[in-house]
Amino acid sequence: MSERELTCIICPASCTLKVRTEPGGSLKVEGALCPRGVDYAKQEVTDPRRIVMSVVKVVGGDLPTVSVKTNKPVPKKCIQEVMKATASIELKAPVEIGQAVIKDICGADVVATRRVKKVNSI
Amino acid sequence: MLELNYDTVIIGAGPAGIAAAIKANELGLKAVLVENRDLLGGIPLQCVHPGFGLHYFKEDLTGTEFIYRFFDKMEKLGVEHLLKSHVHSIEPVAHNEKVVNVITPQGVMRLKTKTLIYTAGARERHVFEINIVGDRPAGIYTAGEAQTLMDIYGIIPGKEIVIIGSGDVGLIMARRFALEGAKVKAVIELMHYPGGLMRNIVQCLQDYDIPLYLGHVATKVVGKKRVEKVVVAKVDEKLKPIEGTELEIPCDTIVLAAGLVPNLDMLEKIGLVIDPYTRGPVVNEFLETNIPGVFVAGNALVINDLVDYVVEQGELAAEGARYFIENDGIPTTDWKPVIRGRNIRFIVPHYVSGKRDVILYARVRQPEKNVVVAIPEVGWKMKQFNVRPAEMIRVKLTKRLLERAASVEKISMEVIPGE
């Protein structure tokens, strides 16, 4: 039976959560002031996920990069895979906010979060 | 020389200025937004991480997504703006007339205006302000500089990083460096508690096994051409380095996240009164300063932790400008001072009339658990499990609530220990 201590990141109350695996295999969470903390703790110990953010190179635009993020949280162990993928591509302007720049990676799409307008090269 | 007339001139096109310009347009004021960079948006444009807009849009957006929503609105309304335009000086001509001298690519302009909304943000404290001795090699950046390089230009400033300061900017940059493959060797924090939000300690440091040195100070930079290492020491209760506790951390880059200071030089030249606790201006509930018709919003007013508050202040300043113009000045009233009570480091605005709703922004001096935040004069209180200097307290007091304080000469906020 394992026990883990977490700091809840859902709200500023920052509860200290204790998560324990019961003999039957179910998870018991102590220390949460609200049910969202319980959900967070269960997710965090079974399948921790994060939004990943980076920038991707753009050619021919008014900015040299476009910022991107995963459109949903991806498993923590996939973060490096997403980062490698974003580092290996190059886009052509224009890029629109919400445009998927990488599709279906670790169960999410990588989408643009900035607009890059096309500029005419001299 | 081109001379133009406006109801309001807004200086600085970050989120506060853009929000003020949009609101001013919606209120029917003739407004112009002046920006010295070649692009609009200010800092959110380089904030690629989520956590923006939870209050304002009820959505979790990146800084970039947040600010583009305002760009779209600006475009729709046709908000007038000047880019690459440097404000040379502000002349206070009369209570209802200021002249803003601007150097623009189209030539020098004199903008005659009834009101001024100043939203030039804050500057980052730099290496010469934080008592680090030693060499001055290449490889020392502020967090904002590092962020501009990485997240606008796609250039990583170094490979082995030490971050000085654990405010949210420092923590977020620690994660950005780690994500991009740099090794973040340490985050150094002078105080015995983190400067940033707890959620950022977890998501930005713990996720990437980045060590946080609380109660430590960087005392010396070592390096010939490029940073080679930084010397760090433990501090005592008076925050002085303890001899014999020094350790050396090899690195090629130092990133300073040592706090922000409101950027007000231009207004100080014309007699702005500064609150030593916020280092921003003393303002009334319209965010008007001691200089009539001059309003300040955003990080130039007070260092905020949420862009949502910055936008709210920008919009309020625009409403203040309209009220000023309608009444040829904010009408004289019995202003009640807002007083800092127990464990309150600062509170903004500094004066309220009690005649309209007001939003108060405050920070505590030190972290405390199980407390009640109270404004006794109006009988308002809020139980809090935790108060921390990193987390701004925002309280909206309605006109009705404020009427309870009609007979008293001040209102105050305090933090009192709970049961």
Image (cartoon, rainbow, N blue to C red):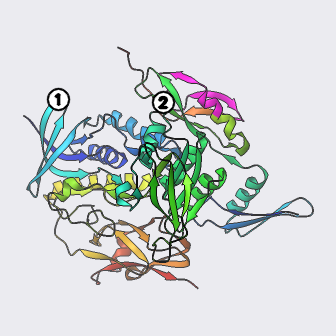
**Left or right for B272, reference B279:** left
Q: Are marks 2 and 1 on the same chain?
A: no
Q: Position of residue B184 (x, y in %)?
A: 58, 49
Q: Do we see residue B116 in this rendering?
A: yes
Queried whether the magenta region covers residue B321, the answer comes back as: no
SS of the residue at dot 2? strand
Queried whether the magenta region covers residue A102, the answer comes back as: yes
**Left or right for B409, reference B359:** left
**Looking at numbered disc 2 in the image, what kind of residue is underneath it?**
Thr
What span is colored magenta in the figure? A84-108
SS of the residue at dot 1? loop
Query: Which quadrant of the figure has residue A78?
Result: top right
Query: Which quadrant of the figure has residue B46?
Result: top left
Check disc 1 and report the residue beneath it.
B106
Query: Which quadrant of the figure has residue B282?
Result: bottom left
Check disc 2 and report the residue beneath it.
A65
**Left or right for B177, reference B288:** right
Whether tag 2 and tag 1 are in contact, CB under 8 A, the answer is: no
Q: From what the image shows, is residue B114 above or below residue B416? A: above
**Left or right for B250, reference B260:** right
Q: Quadrant of the image for the C terminus of chain A?
A: top left
Q: Nearer the viewer, residue B8 or B353?
A: B8
Q: Chain of mark 2?
A: A
Q: Nearer the viewer, residue B334 or B299?
A: B299
